[in-house]
Amino acid sequence: MPVTPRPSIFAVEPYKGGESKIPGVNRIVKLSSNEGAFGPPPSAVAAITEAALGAHRYPDGGATALRTAIGQRFGLDPERIVCGNGSDELLAMLILAYGGEGTELIMSAYGFQMYELTGTWAGCRIIKVPEPNLVTEVDALLAAVGPRTRLMFLANPNNPTGSLMSQAELARLRRELPDNVLLVLDSAYAEYVTDPGYDAGARLVDSSPGNTVMTRTFSKIYGLGGMRLGWAYASPAVVDVLNRVRGPFNLNSAVMAAGIAALSEPGWIEKSVAHNTEWRARLSAGLEAAGIRVQPSQGNFVLADFGSPERAAAADAHLRSRGLIVRAMGGYGLPRCLRITVGTGEECEMVVDALSAFAQGNPATTEAHPVAEAAHG
Ligand SMILES: *Cc1c(COP(=O)(O)O)cnc(C)c1O
């Protein structure tokens, strides 16, 4: 008899990250994983180097210094913060702790893929709520709730659509959700949001009866995706659960030092936000001028709609021929779209130039279908 894993394991589709190589092309511009435009903060690089000298010591399992720094930076109680090996680890711990066989996990149709992947691993039934206009609708989320629902995941802003749910709608969602459903607000792109009414989630966590969690990451604006660092802010009860299930040394010493340094890198957030706001608009406008529809985005990426999977694939091939790697969206059920990270100004201009040339040689054959069709197709 061969060894056999739990049956749900074979339902898991392994995650496919953004590509980083094109055979035969030397200069690659990687705009496929929403990594910040500026590389890692210099002080984080120095901290990693220094931490190497203490590599023989076990790290502080409680991540006390890092949680204190995060708490100070965001005005939150460090006791209510749990750090993870990327926010992916925290999402997985939440799903395995609160979900599992016999439970349902609700997410939006074009929500972040890790929810489905880990939910399936845990044995949850995954319910994807349609997003006819590529925007998450509260009533649709609520309509999907049943007696077995235990988890709801919402990235705000959402990846890959870039859409934002308003605070009023979020508050209504929490109010109308049963108390025994854990609402996880994944705010991976919080820092990039320019909508003035936005709150990344701490307020909703505090006003909820212990059943709302906010997750954050150092992988995007802090430029530390390769180090793997995320954190969650939650009620004392959820924090207790996470601290029971996490590995005792889930963060290594280098990543903790890097995180602390990144938080105090002078001007880093201001510079990154200003750049992203400017170039997100310029990239979007450049593509729109070429006749390519772009979804409004509050993240550090835009979703470009080419009207058909064939035209999107041709655009992708054209970009690759120029060394530009963006993210194909077939895995997200949006094969007519490409997701493009806001890179440096030069990189954004390269994308606009390439896609303008593409659009001239490959005009849309029909009026782009209404997005509503895409959602169900
Ligand atoms: C990038 C991203 C994350 C971050 O994951 P890490 O494990 O922290 O790198 C989480 N959620 C969403 C929606 C993302 O796009």
Image (spheres, helix red, strand yellow):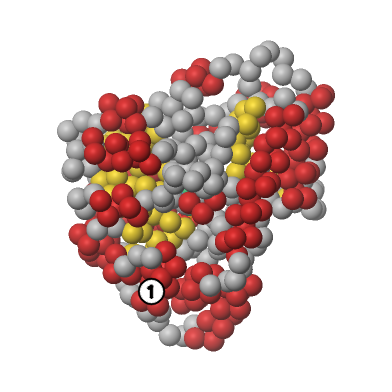
Q: Residue at x 57, y 34 (%)?
A: 296
In the figure, 372 relative to 129: above or below? Answer: above
User: Residue under circle 1?
Assistant: 68
Q: Nearer the viewer, residue 227 or 210?
A: 210
Q: Residue at x 74, y 35 (%)?
A: 286
- Picture quadrant of residue 78: bottom left
Q: Is residue 107 left or right of residue 208?
A: right
- Label 1 CB-ligand 1 distance < 8 A: no
Residue 264, position in %: x, y?
A: 53, 72
Number of other residues with Cα within 10 Å of mark 1, as a class: few under 14, some 14 to 19, many 20 or more: some
Q: Nearer the viewer, residue 11 or 239?
A: 239
Residue 284, position in %: x, y?
A: 67, 36
In the figure, 106 relative to 16: above or below? Answer: above
In the figure, 312 relative to 95: above or below? Answer: above
Q: Is residue 232 left or right of residue 35?
A: left
Residue 283, position in %: x, y?
A: 70, 40
Callout 1 amino acid: Thr
Q: How many marks?
A: 1
Q: Nearer the viewer, residue 247 or 90?
A: 90
Residue 183, position in %: x, y?
A: 29, 45
- Picture quadrant of residue 170: top left
Q: From where the camera sits, is residue 101 visible?
A: no
In the figure, 28 relative to 130: above or below? Answer: below
Q: Nearer the viewer, residue 113 or 290?
A: 290
Identify the residue at the far top of this view: 366
Q: From where the camera sits, is residue 263 visible?
A: yes
Q: Residue at x 46, y 63 (%)?
A: 229
Q: Secondary structure at mark 1?
A: helix
Q: Is residue 71 left or right of residue 190?
A: left
Q: Residue at x 73, y 45 (%)?
A: 348
